[in-house]
Amino acid sequence: MAYLRAIVTDGHPTLRRVAKRVTPREIADPLFQQLIDDMFETMYDAPGVGLAAPQVNVSKRLFVMDVRDDEREPAVVINPKLELAEDEKEMTEGCLSVPGYVGEITRFNRVVVTGLDRNGEKIRLEGEGLFAQCVQHEIDHLDGILYVDKAKNVRLPKTEEEVEVAEAAAAEAY
Ligand code: ZN
């Protein structure tokens, strides 16, 4: 059984902490497995394409993501590490912890990330576009960084065109 957890928003101190690495022993703990289930449930409910543990007030290095791509399974990445990041691009972004706003941010369009899965096995994921954007956004959360720290033109959507962008970004909100 998975439960919804409250998503904390900008101003909450946990969002500004550097999250702690997860130990293999911790991964085996049923409470940790419950956290993963709850994070998926909370992400889908929001809805978002990614959610980092600090966003549910847990200062540990893991995130869940599902970029709704038919060829890609939902994933949990524990102790993530960017192995490769290339091809900088400006992207529109939002965040479940900064509700309602969107902004423009420069990120890498292609990344390779390694880490551990929920069984403690090593994983390596690679991808482009929304996948790459999401991975960078979630790793930033683990380092106490919010996209609004780096983004420009962070705004509440006003014009019809901006509302459309915001709605698109809401579907892509992490
Ligand atoms: Zn976020």
Image (cartoon, helix red, strand yellow):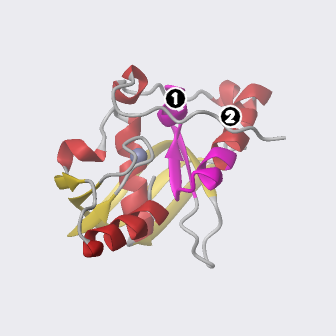
The residues tagged by marks 2 and 1 sit, at their Cα atoms, a distance apart of 11 Å
Marks 2/1 in contact by CB < 8 Å: the verdict is yes
Secondary element at tag 1: loop
Q: Which residue is mark 1?
A: 60
| Place of residue 22 in the rendered image (x, y in percent of width and height, measured from the top left) | 56, 29
Residue placed most toward the observer, 38 or 75: 38
Outermost residue, right direction?
1
Please name the residue shown 45% across and 52% down the image. Answer: 174
Give me the residue at 27% from left, 69% from top: 162
Q: Is residue 166 left or right of residue 149?
A: right
Q: Residues within 10 Å of mark 2 (few under 14, many from 20)?
A: some
Regarding residue 120, the answer to whether it shows in the image is yes
Residue 3 vs residue 141, the one in the foreground? 3
**Quarter of the image where one finds residue 102:** bottom left
Q: Residue 165, located in which quarter of the rendered image?
A: bottom left
Q: Which residues are magenta?
A: 41-65
Residue 112, located in which quarter of the rendered image? Answer: bottom left
The secondary structure type at the circle numbered 2 is helix
